[in-house]
Amino acid sequence: MLSLFHRGWRGSGRSIAGLSLAPRTSVARLAPKKRGMVIRAWFAGTYLNGVDAKHRLSVPAPLRETIEARSQQKALVLAPAEHAPCLVGYDLTHFERLERRLEREFDGDFGPGRGDRGRILFGTTETLRYDDTGRIVLSPILKELGGLDRQALFLGAGDYFEIWSPETLLAEAGLDARLKRIVAALVAGRAA
């Protein structure tokens, strides 16, 4: 079994949605290892998985390893993207970064602007646990907001990842030609 705990690590007692969070610490310092190899601390790669009739979807193993390395949890957070027709996903520790972002943006102002922004950042999110195979169940609203039908395209984006309908991504204006070739090849391979 993969151990993701740093020697001497002690829980902080903080939690979100009933899931405990690791104390604030550098992911690089934790450097979890699997078979002697350091697990990456950033979301990277492009993956295409199917969505079944019951809204089940498997999160790719490399993304799960990053989630677990960063949060020590088999859970992720999904939300509609702010500026694109897709979903964004991240580990539970990302909530802390969102909270700091709110603090910087509003600097102690707890007026209606902060309330609106907080509802967008936190109220539209869903925390989902995944099983040992990485399977999650999308709510109907997330499936609709992500425009997901039978396929879901996962794109690593550093400290988060995106989940797109492949057709929607390919129709995006200004899509990088290299990414378009990769996505088209994945879709063609999946259809074959």
Image (tube, helix red, strand yellow):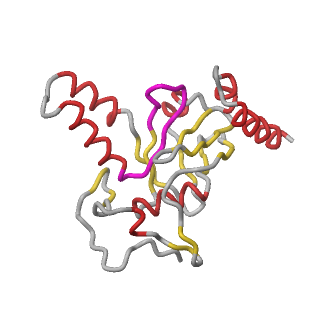
Residue 53, given in percent of the width and then of the height, sits at 65, 39
Residue 83 part of the magenta-drawn span: yes
Q: Quadrant of the C terminus?
A: top right
Q: Quadrant of residue 5?
A: bottom left
Q: Residue at the spot x=24%, y=65% of the render?
A: 12
- Extreme residue in the right direction: 192
- Give the magenta part as a residue range: 79-93
Residue 72, given in percent of the width and then of the height, sits at 41, 64
Q: Quadrant of residue 112?
A: top left
Residue 186, given in percent of the width and then of the height, sits at 76, 42
Secondary structure that dominates the magenta span: loop
Residue 27 appears left or right of 115: right
Residue 145, given in percent of the width and then of the height, sits at 51, 28
Please tell me how many numbered marks the rendered image carries. 0
Q: Residue at the spot x=39%, y=38% of the render?
A: 125
Q: Residue at the spot x=53%, y=45% of the render?
A: 137
Name the residue nearer the viewer: 189 or 43. 43
Residue 105 appears left or right of 31: left
Q: Residue at the spot x=44%, y=71% of the render?
A: 4
